[in-house]
Image (cartoon, rainbow, N blue to C red):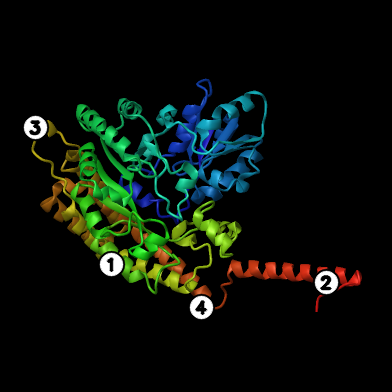
Amino acid sequence: MLLVSPQFPAATFWNIKATSRAGGARHSAIPLGLLTVAALLPATWTCRLVDRNVADLAEADLAWADLVMTGGMNVQRLDCLSLIALVQSRGKVVVVGGPDVTSEPDFYAHADFVVIGEAEVVIQEFIAAWDAGQRRGTFTAEKFKVDVTKTPVARYDLLRRSDYLYLAIQFSRGCPFNCEFCDIIELYGRMPRVKTAAQMLAELEALYRGGYRGHLDFVDDNFIGNKKAVKAFLPELIAWQREHDYPFIFSTEASVNLADDDALLALMRKAGFFVVFVGIESPDGDTLVAMQKKQNARRSLTKSIHKIYGAGMFVIAGFIVGFDTEKGSIADGMVDCIEDADIAICMAGLLTALANTQLTTRLVRERRLFPATWQMEKLGEGGGDQCILGLNFEPLRPRRDVLADYKSVIDRIYTPKAYFGRVTRAARELNCFWPAKKADAKPAWRVAGLTRGNWAALFRLLRSVIREQPLLLGYYLKVLYACARENPGALQAVGTMAAFYLHLGPFSRVVSQAMARQIEEIDSGKWRSPVASIEAERAGEESLTWAKNVALESRAGHSTHV
């Protein structure tokens, strides 16, 4: 079995190649889904992994394989489809699965085997079909039926770990909230399913015994989605960390109501979490309620983010432009929120109607959704994600105004002065000093301070800056010096935030230029909404049907139409 992870397009928020290089790696995240599937396969099957984000797929790899497995997220679709064609052109069988296949299987119907849903439910059925000599088939898993307590440890041994900025692990699947635009709840459900503490510690032990030390990302959709379970797990994680001399630091994704739970914040801090991704989406309360993200409404988002900083974790936040309820310009309010909360790394994007979400269902009903082929055509023009290819529907506000607002946000938050200003302020907010208690003699946050390894990482960062952004070296030196002098325990976090600008600075200019082109297309009259084309086609079809009915009735001698 040859497992192949498709490439991410260059023009995407998360394809942080420059940041990865500064960390001595080729890519940021590992293909955890494929590694987990590999662990589900029979022990008698020999597996190899080729991640096209770190290595080329060679003819020798294809010649070796009996079967090729691939799949990924929607942003990887273009390369995934090209992989399927390549594999089949070499006379090999290809099986495809993953979240994008589950969401829109029609795009992958030409693959030999198609797996829809979570693999654990149907993997034995697929293996039996293969062993029986079948070479085509579709396997559909019943939704949300996977018992994750039976999911095996991922095949980390298939990786060349030095290729990656960090490794990944999963505690839970699903999210309890009901955001209209989100596809996570459609893919994995609203009842978070969690692994046992013993299971998680066994996975950590496997990584530890394999020699890995450093950053581990909990890839959960919402790490605190099941608070009772996570509060039961964290004390055991803390004890394991202490027993093993704190080999890991952690990142994850969580809802902003994390800030409401002091006990949970304290547990995450003691366990060694240093960064959390939070979906803020919009500073406008009416918009948050309309999108059904009520957990963000009726609160001070700035105070919530600073509360998380006070627990020693910095925040990466998601923001979205393009909601129906936006009143006038949303740009000023969004920029003010980002600046007031001192959020350096912001995944600001355009609202995108993902397949099978409540948002898409509503837009279809309102006849405002673009056909799926629209984004495919745009992907073929150079790739991208929601930052460039979003707004795949007709907004209620003029499209030009939405694009101009989004461009304004990107242009303002990613100037060097604004970005490093937020990093500097966040560095002061991060409470990374640990109480001087004997029981906590070796806290997880000590690895975020002035260790030899962190000094080496900072020197690698500065070498990358000199090579790629020499004119900005002063910004990097100033923020690192201020942190080392005022809050040295935050150097790991500040170095990470600073390193992200190696990617975000150039990427923001790519996004801004793309928005300028789209605005110019509208101003010049070249833009034609796919919805308008669909409606014109539909009107033509309805008119033709009406004319045919009139003709038929006239021939029958009883026309009632005028």
Q: Position of residue 76 (x, y in %)?
A: 50, 48
Q: In percent of the image, x 31 and y 28: which residue is there? A: 201
Q: Which mark is residue 336?
A: 1
Sequence order check, earlier mark of 3 and 1:
1
The reply, left or right, for residue 407 in relation to residue 3 is left
Cα distance, mark 2 to mark 1?
Answer: 60 Å
- Tell me which amino acid carries mark 4: Asp
Provide the residue designation for mark 3. 438
Cβ atoms under marks 2 and 1 closer than 8 Å: no
Q: Which mark is residue 550?
A: 2
Q: Provide the secondary structure element on which disc 4 rests.
A: helix
Q: Residue at x 64, y 39 (%)?
A: 88
Labels 2 and 3 touching (C-beta < 8 A): no
As drawn, 418 above or below 91: below
Kindly give the residue lying farthest to the top in the view shown.
44
Residue placed under numbered mark 4 in the picture? 523
Q: CA distance from mark 2 to mark 4?
A: 42 Å
Q: Residues within 10 Å of mark 2 (few under 14, many from 20)?
A: some
The kind of residue on which mark 3 rests is Lys
Q: Residue at x 33, y 55 (%)?
A: 317
Q: Earlier in the sequence, mark 2 or mark 3?
A: 3
